[in-house]
Image: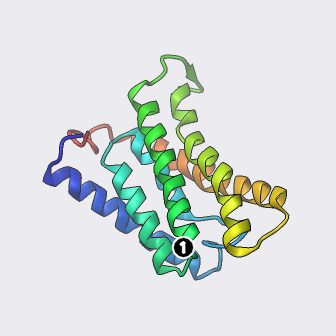
Amino acid sequence: MKLSIRNITYGAVIAAIYIVLTYIVNLFGLANGAVQVRLSEALTILPYFTASAIPGLFIGCLLSNVLTGCALPDIIFGSLATLIGAIVTYYLGRHRSEKTLFGHSVSEYLAPVPAILSNTLIIPFVLKYAYGIVPLWFSFVTVFAGEVISCGILGLVLLFALKRYPGLFHDAS
């Protein structure tokens, strides 16, 4: 990714939107805890379009976790889970599938999967060791469900909406 004012601005705007969306959902008690449905996690599909989203999502998640009062392991490992998902999503976007399903590339349908998997595999351990939430299997189920809603359903809606504007992220990567 070329370091430019445009890329820095894209990343900063994405981070700001992530923080605002997390705050809105936090008002309803859905941003933290065993069952998390963060609207901001829908943004995890953005690296599919631009590398600028990778630092934006990481910083947005990190600051959101700090500002909403998360425990230190959640701040660190929750942000790293988002970073891992963002990096893999970026590579999915660079290697788009020629196969289509219902008029969309198969890789588009796969765009939310890295964030869903990274959060589902990391966050339940954070919930157990940082917050004492047990049983562990229940956290796996609830985190997976929240990620499917946030990243899978809402993320795909966002992806298909943004796809209609092909020049939106032009020159961002």
Direction from residue 115 to residue 35 in the image, left or right: right
Residue at 70% over, 74% down: 131
- The quadrant of the rendering that contains the C terminus is top left
Rendered image quadrant of residue 9: bottom left
Disc 1, SS = helix
Please give the count of numbered marks on the rendered protein. 1
Q: Is residue 46 visible?
A: yes
Residue at 60% over, 40% down: 113
Rendered image quadrant of residue 146: bottom right
Residue at 31% over, 37% down: 166
Pointer 1 local density, CA inside 10 Å: few below 14, some 14–19, many at least 20:
few
Q: How is the image coloured?
A: rainbow
Residue at 46% over, 54% down: 43
Q: Is residue 146 above or below residue 33?
A: above
108, 147: nearer the viewer? 147
Q: Is residue 29 above or below residue 35?
A: below
- Dot 1 amino acid type: Leu
- The quadrant of the rendering that contains the N terminus is top left
Q: Is residue 95 above or below residue 17?
A: above
Q: Position of residue 58 (x, y in %)?
A: 41, 58
> Furthest-top residue in view?
98
Q: Is residue 35 visible?
A: no
Q: Position of residue 34 (x, y in %)?
A: 73, 68
Direction from residue 138 to residue 168 in the image, left or right: left
161, 22: nearer the viewer? 22
> What residue is shown with label 1?
72
Q: Is residue 29 above or below residue 16?
A: below
4, 45: nearer the viewer? 4
Q: Position of residue 4 (x, y in %)?
A: 14, 49
